[in-house]
Image: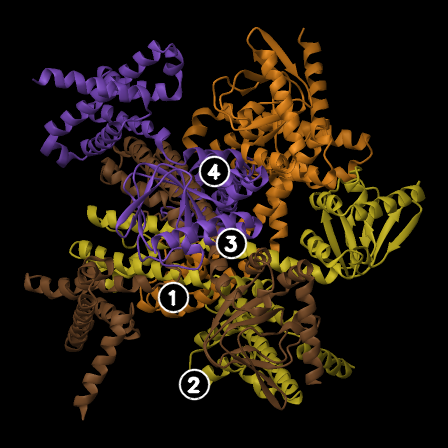
Chain colours: A brown, B yellow, C orange, D purple
Amino acid sequence: MSRPLVPRLLAEFVAATNGRNMTRAAYVVVATGSAMMGLITVDPAYEAAHHWVDAVLWACLAFFVFEWAVRLRHAFLAGHGSSYAISGRGLVDAVSAAAIPLALVLGASPKTAWLLGVCWLLKVVPGIPGLRQLRRVLVQESGPLSSVLVIFLMVLFLSSVAVHVLERDIQPVAFGSVPATLWWAVVTLTTVGYGDAVPTTPLGRLVAAMVMICGLGVFGLWTGILATGFAAQTRRDNFLKTWESVSKVPFFAALGPSAIADVTHMLRTMDLPARTMIIRKGQTGDCMYFVADGEVEVDLPGKKVTLGAGAFFGEMALLGNNMRSANITTRRVSKLLVLDLVDFRLLMARHPDLAATIDAEARRRALENR
Amino acid sequence: MSRPLVPRLLAEFVAATNGRNMTRAAYVVVATGSAMMGLITVDPAYEAAHHWVDAVLWACLAFFVFEWAVRLRHAFLAGHGSSYAISGRGLVDAVSAAAIPLALVLGASPKTAWLLGVCWLLKVVPGIPGLRQLRRVLVQESGPLSSVLVIFLMVLFLSSVAVHVLERDIQPVAFGSVPATLWWAVVTLTTVGYGDAVPTTPLGRLVAAMVMICGLGVFGLWTGILATGFAAQTRRDNFLKTWESVSKVPFFAALGPSAIADVTHMLRTMDLPARTMIIRKGQTGDCMYFVADGEVEVDLPGKKVTLGAGAFFGEMALLGNNMRSANITTRRVSKLLVLDLVDFRLLMARHPDLAATIDAEARRRALENR
Amino acid sequence: MSRPLVPRLLAEFVAATNGRNMTRAAYVVVATGSAMMGLITVDPAYEAAHHWVDAVLWACLAFFVFEWAVRLRHAFLAGHGSSYAISGRGLVDAVSAAAIPLALVLGASPKTAWLLGVCWLLKVVPGIPGLRQLRRVLVQESGPLSSVLVIFLMVLFLSSVAVHVLERDIQPVAFGSVPATLWWAVVTLTTVGYGDAVPTTPLGRLVAAMVMICGLGVFGLWTGILATGFAAQTRRDNFLKTWESVSKVPFFAALGPSAIADVTHMLRTMDLPARTMIIRKGQTGDCMYFVADGEVEVDLPGKKVTLGAGAFFGEMALLGNNMRSANITTRRVSKLLVLDLVDFRLLMARHPDLAATIDAEARRRALENR
Amino acid sequence: MSRPLVPRLLAEFVAATNGRNMTRAAYVVVATGSAMMGLITVDPAYEAAHHWVDAVLWACLAFFVFEWAVRLRHAFLAGHGSSYAISGRGLVDAVSAAAIPLALVLGASPKTAWLLGVCWLLKVVPGIPGLRQLRRVLVQESGPLSSVLVIFLMVLFLSSVAVHVLERDIQPVAFGSVPATLWWAVVTLTTVGYGDAVPTTPLGRLVAAMVMICGLGVFGLWTGILATGFAAQTRRDNFLKTWESVSKVPFFAALGPSAIADVTHMLRTMDLPARTMIIRKGQTGDCMYFVADGEVEVDLPGKKVTLGAGAFFGEMALLGNNMRSANITTRRVSKLLVLDLVDFRLLMARHPDLAATIDAEARRRALENR
């Protein structure tokens, strides 16, 4: 009876592995494997349960070997095998699968070989949410950031030489050479301050104090640059995400392109799974919603109304009545556009026709539900 | 004679406890209780005054038990007893009241049992000003923030493995296992830098230096994201707070909805207790005020003029005469709208009719007070 | 012969002291006094030169006593003596003059008594540039800032109790009581990390790691709030400073009030002492200047042209010719308005009449200087 | 045969040195020299290879002497010799060339003399990208920054005196004098926290805790100021860089000056070397490109189309078809203007005529390539 199950599971796994970056199973395996890999270095724990730890590690490895094989096969069948094999993702898959066996074959001790399992973590990278956004900020601000980095390195080197000269006779171990002093400098300039090397002469301390204040400055510059980049990127990303949805709502379609751009800046997209409560009766609200995709259910007394794509709800909160009057839940995976009170005011001011439409609909609903 | 007093106080306390999150008394009790709870762990202090400390602690506990009982009763009478009991606030109240006696009954030493009084602090949470705002920022920026957190964790794990490999032979205690090295990594990456574990090999230090610089980067990203979120949230909050008040000032009511949205962005709300001085004679001023709610008193030579909701004052400062010409104080709790010089200029430029109104009123007053 | 000099100097000093916050002499005295006060605590240095150090300190004290006397007399003559005496500045003056003699009379050792000279530093406070601006930011952002502070304190207390419970048996000195553990918590949460108290149990380290990451978060929130506040305040301050000057330039007077507000946002004020070079021949330039106050001298070949308030120069750099064609220096203290290339483009686009004026003037000058 | 080579190389080197800040060779020499200078202080390494290290160092020095000579000669021939000699760059060149020989002649030990090679690093300064921008931010924000610095110094001094008084009896070495305590204060206030001096009395720790929290505040202010300055500067810089290019694209030339300023804010400049891939077939795209300078090659099936300055491409991605349909590479050094989807929408909304032009061209191309 288990026979037909295994191939079915395999087939499902293969299908999932082909199409997606990482299956949910893969995340679990990476987490488990990494934890076990850490555990193998803790002698008492490993001695107590080494059979179990070894078994789990080998299972993880088997999983990654299998995953790599499935992906390689799929890529070759689809005709882009070599491009997958040398792509970043392909290389990570290859190293995850092959590095540990290779190390064991080459005679490394198991404890060292399994540490190569740290590569498994790199499989998670493409799945990090918002990574694209982070990378764009770093790329666009790379000019000033690298400028700060060069300044950082110059302060590091100049202060190392100065403190080396001032302290080398008194503390020959910590400050006896420029490379040794560089260690002190980097520990100080990043404000980590281990305290393993501390200048003791008055002049050395003066230089050190200036290095510390420079450290604050580097921090400040770095942060200032990133904050600026982020502000710009966030605005842009939100616009792109929202734009798609806005065009699907007939309510906005009547607006000219200029007004649509205007509206897009005001809306926020919200992706919700099925059966999520959006509005709870009796809560106070300060936003209204447009259904861009999916379906929501309004739980009115005695009946249930379904609103599909293009409909809007929650507008009463913006027209003077703060208390939500019904529970509203999603019926399936839905994409909503949220309009806050602030922006609602602005929108109504600039496009009075929209105001009229919303007002009429609200009145109609109020009458109906009376 | 004390009989009728106690029930009266009790009744007042019960009324206050029913209706509000935290009475002022409760704040005092939380602060006192927490301080005593700290004191109980200081042996010399506790030995010197253990009767007093114990008495205060039991009194605090009694207060919280009583508070819980009052709230439970009130909630059940109001028909939402069970929803209160399992709400966050209800659970904190329950734990505050029941955890310590339970621990004592179960045989924990008094010193340990009283430490559970730390739960009392959680009662303060709903009363923290601006917490809502903070939470919204964290929610809206949760995408990039969690992305940075994942990067943080990956750097942590990767650097731990690297430094473990490089340092395990030389410093088996601090770097002998991956979990032990993780401690070093988190201490370094957050730039805390205790100095209890410090890499000493050249390669280990190189990796450590890169971890430190990553630490700066994580700091910068984190801050940049939060700064961006805050800027957006602050603008929004201010608008919402001000909007309500603006509509109550007849002076602005004449404007169209577009202009009102415009004006709202320029004004700042100010809530003042009774008998507060707003303007001091002889100071220089750069803003004018509109009374949205309450009453203010102008202390003119020889007479006192009262201005109610809808009036404005301090406009002379914006019309060329910088020196305030009279003391102005609130007569009762008042809500003022503040218009700064900068925005006054812009407002006057865009809405010349408002300028004319203010100018006329200013002239009328100047004539009257001559 | 020295007789007439001393009273003259005194009279000058008295006049300066009456009218100003701090004379330049007072800054020197504060700096010298503070340095000497530091020196008095360094035993070898003080023993070597105690006559000199004592002499300087007594001289500084005499200066502050005299200053206080002069100010008190002036204030009483002007009829606001008591209000000066109890004002912040008056109290600092009083303490600066009276605290040290009083301490010496009351029997404090000289070394301790002179340390009270630290109050002298407080005299500098009103003279700090930009302090007003800083204070306004702190006041306006006090809501979220205090919210973060409360969160900071709660994390502090909660983590102290947790780590105390986890570490008290192993490290009774550092973690034996909650107040002792609070010291560890504050050192960790601010990422200072002395390393004098370090948790060693696995659970204690887990809590500590979470405290450190919270520390980063607190940093981030704090900075984000301040950055937001600063951005708003800077825009406002710049507008106010520039507004005054713009109205004095006839070139802009022709514009309507709306346009003036627009222009004011684009200009930057620059205060220059006499005989400062503004433009150096042969440099590349990307801004033009308007003289709001004072006089500048253009060093043309063979003649010198003086431009007074209301004139403009450097416009060639914005009309296509990047190379500055003459040296231009201030003749006396001058206030200039700077218009950058970016804003020049925008200005010209929105107000074509201004463009025509500047163009005509530039052509006239070019012809004249040919 | 080597004769004619050396003079030729020399001539090339001289020509490069005359005209440019730093030749690529000079960067290499600076890096090599600095590394060797660090190595000379590491005794085992230097002993093992002192002939090599010395040789490299002398070669670097020779290079800088030669460079200085070439530049001096060139400057004198061009008639601005003395102004070069006393300019910042000239002085750095002089010190780089002369300091080490001078120190050796004056009898300094070689190890100390070569450390003066740290001046070589200063030659890199003018070549740091974005330094101009950083400096402008620091200059424009110098007001609030120096205000924070003064506050920083005051907190430093006040807390030093307080902690000195509280701790001097218990820890006479670390806190015995105000200067010694200043070291503790600066280490704490910058959150470096070496742990070499730690207050132990309860009151001393209370003061220290407040200093640490002030440290966070100083951080926050500093960063907030810099972030604000950066945001403004970045916007300005981008405008200036883009403005030049926009005017060269005939497509935009038809717009009025106001619209051009508008467009300039939306575009981003991109400088690309020859033979760089801009668009890869099959990728998803969200921006279009205008060629401001240079030439790009479109790799269509069966033919290659060359687009010169003024042309645009990639517009399909913005007109609904996200998938890039051809590889596009630069043919020589090119300057492109990038228009993102967000801004494209806005542009089209505000300038419908541009939309029509792009649409027509896109249709023509689609037909042609069918």
Residue flagged by tag 1: what amino acid is it?
A: Val
State the residue at coordinates (39%, 21%).
D88
> The residue tagged with tag 2: helix, strand or loop?
loop
> The residue tagged with tag 3: helix, strand or loop?
helix
Q: In the image, which is nearer the foreground, mark 2 or mark 3?
A: 3
Look at mark 2 in the image and give the residue it sits on.
B106
- Where's the C terminus of chain C, which quadrant? top right
Answer with the quarter of the image where residue D5 lies.
top left
Label 4 or label 3, whichever comes before in sequence order: 4
A266 to A20, vertically: above or below = above
Look at mark 1 in the image and give the residue it sits on.
C207
Mark 3 Cα-neighbour bin, 10 Å: few <14, some 14–19, many ≥20: many
Q: Which mark is residue D250?
A: 4
The residues tagged by marks 3 and 1 sit, at their Cα atoms, a distance apart of 49 Å
**Which residue is nearer to you in this view: B257 or C7?**
B257
Q: In the image, which is nearer the foreground, mark 4 or mark 2?
A: 4
Look at mark 3 in the image and give the residue it sits on.
D345
Q: Is residue A296 visible?
A: yes
The residues tagged by marks 2 and 1 sit, at their Cα atoms, a distance apart of 26 Å
Taking the image as shown, residue A121 lies to the left or right of residue C111, namely left
Tell me whether marks 2 and 3 sit on the same chain: no
> The residue tagged with tag 1: helix, strand or loop?
helix
Tell me whether marks 2 and 1 sit on the same chain: no
Q: Are marks 4 and 1 in contact (CB under 8 Å)?
A: no
At which x and y percent is residue A193?
Answer: 35, 47
Q: Are marks 3 and 1 in contact (CB under 8 Å)?
A: no
Residue flagged by tag 4: what amino acid is it?
A: Pro
Residue flagged by tag 2: what amino acid is it?
A: Leu
Q: In the image, which is nearer the foreground, mark 4 or mark 1?
A: 4
Q: In the image, which is nearer the foreground, mark 3 or mark 1?
A: 3
